[in-house]
Amino acid sequence: MWWTRGVSDARRSAAYRAHVIESAFPVHVVGLMLAIVAPVVSKVRNPDFMALFAETLPGVDFREVWAVVSYVLFSSTQYARDAYVTHYEIACELVNWLGMLVRCSMARYRPQMPWGVIRFVTVVASAMGARYEFRTQWIRTVAKMATACVIDARMKQKHHPEHLGKPFPELLRLELAIFAFYGVVNLGTQYVLETIDRKKFESALATRHGDGERFSQGGRDGAPAPAPRRSARRRATGETGRE
């Protein structure tokens, strides 16, 4: 019946979401640890206050915000994992957007740093460790990177000596070209990883379906039934004794 199919599709979607989270979770936790350490190291090496929006938010250094938020998220992965998995997508977006604002802040005050290499590494790291289902994340990734283009172009026009006085549209076109490159790197990496995830999920689903058929056959023939498998959500949350 149509309502039975709807319930089945919902369960399949929930199981696939849990599978993607389970696949990314170890790298995600490592990424949170690095997101705590990186801004602390930056503050030690560059103790100057780095306000990205000095006119509107003069008291906000996003390095500090990123470190505190990442610490809270990391603690949640250890002590409130069920709730964390429930809101996993929000956690990923917090890490991604704050990381982007930190990078823009440092690029404003330290333009001499090797930002080409730094951005490439962080884009790949984000695609690996702060990812969820591609079908829902890609548009948010594009929005984040487009926002970064506007911020970078404005900061270069106002604060970088080599770009002072250049028209904003000219700088924005340059940033859009950079955005296109990093967008392909980010979304391409995520798409490849999720393609692997989907193949593993379909394989596990087929195996489980085969186990179910053998279970039914065993009930009729008197053969022992296969042992139940842990749910994908339990594997993602690390729980073994409760849902």
Image (tube, rainbow, N blue to C red):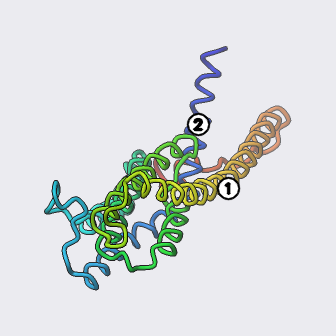
Name which residue lies at 52% across and 60% down.
178
Q: Earlier in the sequence, mark 1 or mark 2?
A: 2
Q: Residue furthest right?
A: 221
Q: Quadrant of residue 5?
A: top right
Using the image as rendered, state which of residue 167 and residue 146 is in the foreground.
Answer: 167
**Residue linked to disc 2:** 13
Q: CA distance from mark 1 to mark 2?
A: 19 Å
Residue pointed to by mark 1: 192
Q: Position of residue 102 (x, y in %)?
A: 33, 65
Residue at screen point 58% across, 33% down = 11
* Kind of residue at disc 1: Val
Instruction: Classify residue 15 as left or right of residue 118.
Output: right
Secondary structure beneath dot 2 equals: helix
Residue 115 point in image, percent of width and height: 45, 73
| Structural crowding at the residue carrying mark 1, measured as other residues with C-alpha within 10 Å and reported as few (<14), some (14–19) or many (≥20) | few
Outermost residue to the bottom: 45
Badge 1 marks a residue whose secondary structure is helix
Out of 86 and 106, give the one closest to the viewer. Answer: 106
Residue 133, percent across and down? 56, 46
Q: How many numbered marks appear?
A: 2
- Which quadrant does the N terminus fall into? top right
Please give the name of the residue rendered at 85% of the width and 35% of the height, measured from the top-left corner: 221
Q: Amino acid at mark 2?
A: Ser
Instruction: Indicate the quadrant where residue 190 lies.
Output: bottom right
